[in-house]
Each structure stands twice: as structure tokens, then as C-alpha cells.
Image: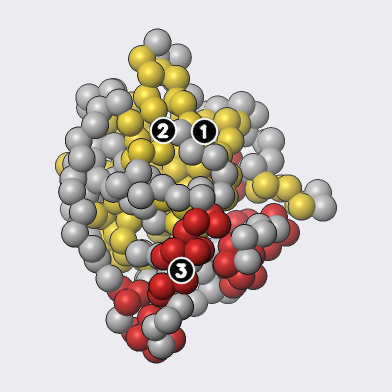
Amino acid sequence: MAKSMEEWLDTDVAELEKLPVDELGSVFFFRDPMRSNHIDNEHFYSPADGTILYQKYIEDPNAPIVEVKGKKYTLKDVMGDKDYDQPSLVVGIFMSFYDVHINRIPYGGHITWKPLDSIESMNKPMLALEKDILNAAINPKHMIDYLKNNERMFNKIYSPRLDYTYYLIQIADEDVDVIAHFIHDQNSLVSQNDRFSLIRWGSQVDLVLPLDKRYNFELIHSDTTHVEAGVDKLIKLIYK
């Protein structure tokens, strides 16, 4: 369930820190806890366990989601598409070493996906940001390099119920072994909160909701809240 960063550090992380590092890395990291599949047509659920880094309504696709010393992370960077120009709500969730790394579907529909290569020859590390989170003090300068450069998996989900398309962008860490989809057929039907992927040894998931004149999207949690996939509602869908 959703917790403030401080509460999560004092409870979940404090308990997990008692385990040996090799057990955390080789066994507990790959845990896949049983969770109920909620069907809630008025909410998008969290796609990942982790800490909310940012939640922004971006009207101008060239406006920064994160900016450090003039270096910008924009919607076009998120999507890996220099032509993407749809005003959108973007929510970034960072998965730490202590989080479950199974990703889930925020709202049911048909899923297609494709891998996007890194901008440079090697992925940038995310360890500095993870240390920030574990110290309860996030510094944007530790985000910008990996957000701009690292390889990602582009997932597009079309919801027939809403006649609406949204996106999940999985971003790989330096040490990522693979972004492993559980669904092999393109355009497969997926239900809300279904397990659809595992990111081994990392990383981050961005939920992108193009703004639509038929709907309003109302944020439920504040930045730095720790959420769980398939458990916590992230965005309330309001019909205009």
C-alpha cells in the first residue's frame, strides 16, 4: 500500500536490510508476490513498485520534465520519438533494489511493444539516485543522464472501453540483464493489474497518458510517495 518515502524506509526497507546482500540479490529481488487483480474502470493503477519521482502535465512536448543545467528530459525523450507532440501526463516511478520488479497493467486493453536502443553505446547507472532515495533526499542531477540516454521498452496499450491509447516506458539501468515480457503475442488482450513484464536489475517505469478532451486525469499521490503495482491507484479517471 502507498506510504510516504520516510514510512517506507522505516518499515519495509528497515526489515529487508536485515537480510544478507546475496540473499537480497539472488532470491528476494526476484520475488513475485500474489496480489488481487482489481478491476476498477475509474482508475489507473501503478505499473510498478517504487518511488514516484515526478508527476507532470506537459502541454508543450519540448518543455522539460526534468532539467539540470540546461539539459532537458522531455516527452520526446520519454517516448524515444522526436515527432511525439501530444500533450500528456507523465508519471515516473523508480524501482529500487528493495522493490518487487514485476510490472503490471494500469488499465486493461490490447498491448503492443518494441525495444528502443540506448542513445549511447552503454546505459548510464542509476545507483546515485537509488542512494538518494534510501537517504530520503532526491537530487534531479542524478536522473538526467540515464533518463536521456538509456535503452527502454516502449509499450502501447489501447483500451477499447475508453477508445483511448496510453503508454508504459520501461527504462533500463546500467546493470539490467533483460526487460522480459511475459506476453509473447503482439496486440494481446491484458486485464487491469495483470503481470506483463520483469525488469532484471533495475530500473524505472514512466506512465504516459495523452491528454484527452473527453477525460480529466486527477493525481492521487504526491511526489516521493512509495507505491505498489496492482495495489495502489495512481490516477483517477474523470469523465467530462
Q: Nearer the viewer, mark 2 or mark 3?
A: 3
34 is higher (above) or lower (below) than 65: below
Foreground residue among 144 and 51: 51
Of the numbered discs 3 and 1, the one sitting upstream in the chain is 3
Label 1 to label 2: alpha-carbon separation: 10 Å
Of the numbered discs 2 and 3, the one sitting upstream in the chain is 3
Residue type, label 3: Val
The residue that disc 3 covers is 13
Image location (x, y in percent) of residue 195: 24, 54
Residue 116 visible in the picture: no
Foreground residue among 24 and 5: 5
Q: Nearer the viewer, mark 1 or mark 2?
A: 2
Q: Dot 1: what SS?
A: strand
The residue that disc 2 covers is 235
Pointer 3 with pointer 1, Cβ within 8 A: no
Label 2 to label 3: alpha-carbon separation: 25 Å
On residue 89, the disc is: 1
Q: Which residue occupies 53% across, 55% down? A: 5
Q: Nearer the viewer, mark 3 or mark 1?
A: 3
Q: Which residue occupies 38% across, 19% down? A: 238
Local crowd size for mark 2, using a 10 Å CA cut-off: few (<14), some (14–19), many (≥20): many
